[in-house]
Image (spheres, rainbow, N blue to C red):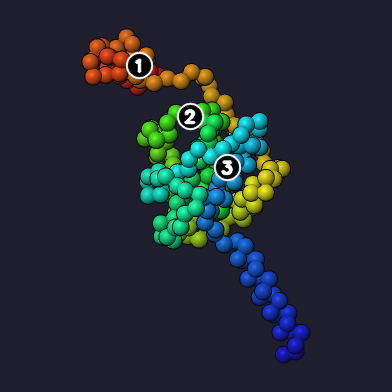
Amino acid sequence: MTYYTRLKGYILCGLLLLFTIGLSATFIRPDQALTIARNWMLHNQPGSSYQLEKMNSFTDDALNPQSLRADFIENDLPELYLIHFANGAFTLVSADNNMPPVLAYSSNPSDDLNDMPPAFLMWLEYYAQNTRYIREKSIVNPDNQALWQDYSRNVFSGHSRSRDISPLIETNWNQDWPYNELCPQDSSGPGGRVYAGCVATA
């Protein structure tokens, strides 16, 4: 075998190795997730300052407080980050680069996200299951990896904003006071009344 033939083989193997390393799954650190979330919000809702208020990671069916500098054990990696900004906005960011970077966001001031409805937690668990599946099966998604690279560099060309859905009703409802004002009296209830209940509120 000649020198040039061996050299071609080495170069081909090297290029193949470089290509496959770039396609492997990468865990997203909290600081990377914050960069993506901030870039996304500034692109979709410009004119506001997006200062971090707090960050939560979603692991094992629970939201946990998350610091920007954290060490993780490989078997206990977060699946999602829920990033809360000081202006009330939030962004849900995946913790794996084979998932889409931004899974949900809202620029409207949110209620206390620590008191979330069960359906919201089930929705988070759905995304977490997808992330776990991708990690277990070592699924590679080059399109999503390209999105991660673009969003981290604040490049959004070719990425549509058409999925932004405004609320159908601008009113916020709840089951406690004053929405339960016409409900039967109960001294231990909010405002001295029983809760309105789902059907009555709807």
Tag 1's secondary structure? Answer: loop
- First along the sequence among labels 3 and 2: 3
Visible residue check, residue 9? yes
Depth check, front residue: 69 or 123? 69
Question: Is 152 on the left or on the right of 176, as rendered?
Answer: right
The residue type indicated by label 1 comes to Trp
Amino acid found under the numbered disc labelled 3: Ala
Judging by the rendered image, the residue that carries numbered circle 3 is 37
Query: Mark 3: few, some, or many residues within 10 Å (few <14, many ≥20)?
Result: many
Closer to us: 54 or 138 = 54
Pointers 2 and 1 in contact (C-beta within 8 Å): no
Query: In the current view of this chain or complex, which residue is farthest to the right?
Result: 4
Question: Residue 92 in the image: x percent, y percent?
Answer: 51, 41
List the residue tagged with mark 2.
Answer: 110
Q: Quadrant of the C terminus?
A: top left
Where, by quadrant of the figure, is residue 197 drawn? top left
Task: Answer with mark 2 or mark 1, whichever residue precedes in sequence.
Answer: 2
